[in-house]
Amino acid sequence: MSFTVPDIAWAQLAPVLIVLGAAVVGVLVEALVPRRVRRVVQLTLTLVALAAAVVAVAALWNGVADTGGTEVLGGSLLVDGPTLVLWAITAVLALLAVLVIADRTATGEDAFAPQGAAVPGSGYEEAARAAGLEQTEVYPLVLFATGGMLIFPATGDLLTLFVALEVLSLPLYLLTGLSRRRRLLSQEASMKYFLLGSFASALLLFGIALLYGFSGSLRYAEIAEAVRTVTGMDGLLLAGSLLVLAGLLFKVGAVPFHSWTPDVYQGAPTPITGFMAACTKVAAFGALVRVFYTVVPDLRWDLEPVMWTVAIATMAVGTVVALVQTDVKRVLAYSSIAHAGFVLTGVVALVQSGITAVLFYLLAYGAATVGAFGIVSLVRERGAVRSGAAGAVGAAGAAGAAGARVPALAAAGSSARAGASAGSTADVVGTGAGAGAGAGDGVDRPAVAGADGEEPPVEAEGPILGEATHLSQWAGLGRTNPVLATTFALFLLSFAGIPLTAGFTGKFAVFSAAVEGGAWPLAVVGVLASAAAAFFYVRIIVLMFFTSPHGGPRDDADDEARPGAVVVASQGFAVVAIGACAVLTVLLGVLPGPVLDAVAGVAQLLP
Amino acid sequence: MTLTNYLVLSGILFSIGAATVLLRRNAIIVFMGVELMLNATNLALVTFSRLHGDLTGQVMAFFVMVVAAAEVVVGLAIIVSIFRTRKSASVDDINLLKS
């Protein structure tokens, strides 16, 4: 057996190489550059790498539009039109997401734990926070994940598919667990994501083994060939393709495999949630489209019932469950599940226009998602609105779980620098305890977390705590911060698919592709689900603009003890990102023609 | 002994692993179930490789080992950090996020 040296087309690989190369350099920066300048260096490196990836994609565009694409690395990577579009979308969205991640806001603290390894609430963590340590490893991790996301939809064989899946997943598991605030929730989300994610990739891997057993090859093209010619091993083929699709549907967040989505979206640091909601979905749908269109199209009569069921269930569950959520991040998470269902209708259509529709939808959804989570990361709660009533965020039990030492530590710290330090320590477990303990700004006051005694006077300026994610805290935001609330409303309208926003064009494209492909029942369900979904988006808009502060919906479990919301000033990065997302959302809604034409011109998958 | 027996064994091991993930409550044990699933897949890959007289499956098995090692690093880091916070590795104790 002889070994042939693969012919490497460096130019076609440039976007991937730039991003992964910068990630490796980022690890070296972490080791060699002094701490003072590390953040600046990492941030510059990340932004430059992602911008360079966008440029490299643009440089490849004309060549691919003329030739229809090339196989790179002996067919392991297929650089064709859809790949380029997905690369461009992923790189642009990752760039915007990194801007949100980098923003330290007026509080001077980013969204990540000062030391990821420190036990929440411990003295070591407090020391790390006081020393101003930062977890700048976040940037290389984001770059590694982005690199995996670039490879994932471009793969031409199942081996690369699996490796890319892990390269994109592993950094995300870690990033999920690094939240500065509410660290127990964050770690819990990280563990859930990890266990379910590795379970799903094991399923995918077994599917790969079965497909290999069926066809004797890992190449997409050769498997597709075997699907047409080989007979008598239908069991292997069907089980294999179902398992592979299950693994991909997990990453997409489609319904039988969606249970991780709300928990992970809620627990992860908000900028990371935006990154992973947008970019993971783009990459996973890209891979799903390629597998569905080029590997198993001849199985459509077997797979169609399954995929139809999944698509309908995804739209229905995402929409219905979103109606009863009270947490902004969970609402957006369930809305992302519903959107996965909408995109799936375009995928199962199995027509050429379906590819264009899916690509456009992913761009529209991604832009609105990064922007929306960027805004969520700026809306914070202010501690010390009232002391005493520990109105916890469903995390009341958290204080107990973490042991009594968290409140104790907060009380101990309430002497000199009580304001900031006690507030942020107690905020480890949730906002309720923070509101109770982070009482004074320099005033020596005994922290009375949990005691229902007399109410201390309301502080005008408490410490800024974590994000105000409960919907009731968003009431009246349109009056206090009209620009921010209007932008958020724009993103919500785009999610809802109101005309003149990008979401409308995207929905129209996927539904008409579904009708063209004969999947009109899916389109009907999709339209009905969109109508129902519009209700809860509009409800948030009404809440922001037509409800007075503290007048929002309440549950009985957590009474009015929630601190109100304030909007922290951005350092500028997040504003740029949110602005760019808003512009993209409006432009794609008002003038979708050029982008649709450009995408349709290259939307031809290599076999 | 035919090669099919190895495939049956691989299927059984994979099922045991999947059942472990779904039924056990300790995060470490759940994680071991995932590893068992990966290794069962390796056995299937190598067997198929032998059946087809093609080396790709064995190469894939090497990649799976590397990925599994990377997964252990990340997974144990997450589980250990949770354990140090809560003194428990039970999946049931970890229920702050309502699901």
Image (cartoon, rainbow, N blue to C red):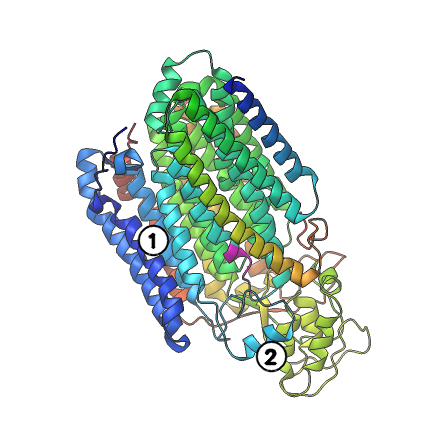
Q: Residue at x 42, y 31 (%)?
A: A347
Magenta range: A174-179
| Residue A337 locus on image (x, y percent) | 54, 42
The amino acid beneath tag 2 is Ala
Question: Can you tell which quarter of the image residue A61 is in?
Answer: top left
Q: Is residue A506 visible?
A: yes
Where A95 falls versus B99 (above or below)?
Answer: below
Q: Nearer the viewer, mark 2 or mark 1?
A: 1
Q: Is residue A88 magenta?
A: no
Is the residue marked by circle 1 packed among few (<14), some (14-19), or many (20+) residues within 10 Å? Answer: many
Q: Residue at x 45, y 59 (%)?
A: A487
Residue type at tag 1: Leu
Mark 2 → mark 1, Cα distance in angstroms: 38 Å
> Residue A42's x, y, as percent?
37, 67
Q: Residue furthest top?
A: A232
Chain assignment, label 1:
A
Residue behind mark 2: A420
Q: Dot 2, how many residues are within 10 Å of its Cα: few (below 14), some (14-19), or many (20+)? A: many
Q: Which residue is mark 1?
A: A20
Q: How many marks?
A: 2
Circles 2 and 1 on the same chain: yes
Which of disc 1 and disc 2 is earlier in sequence?
1
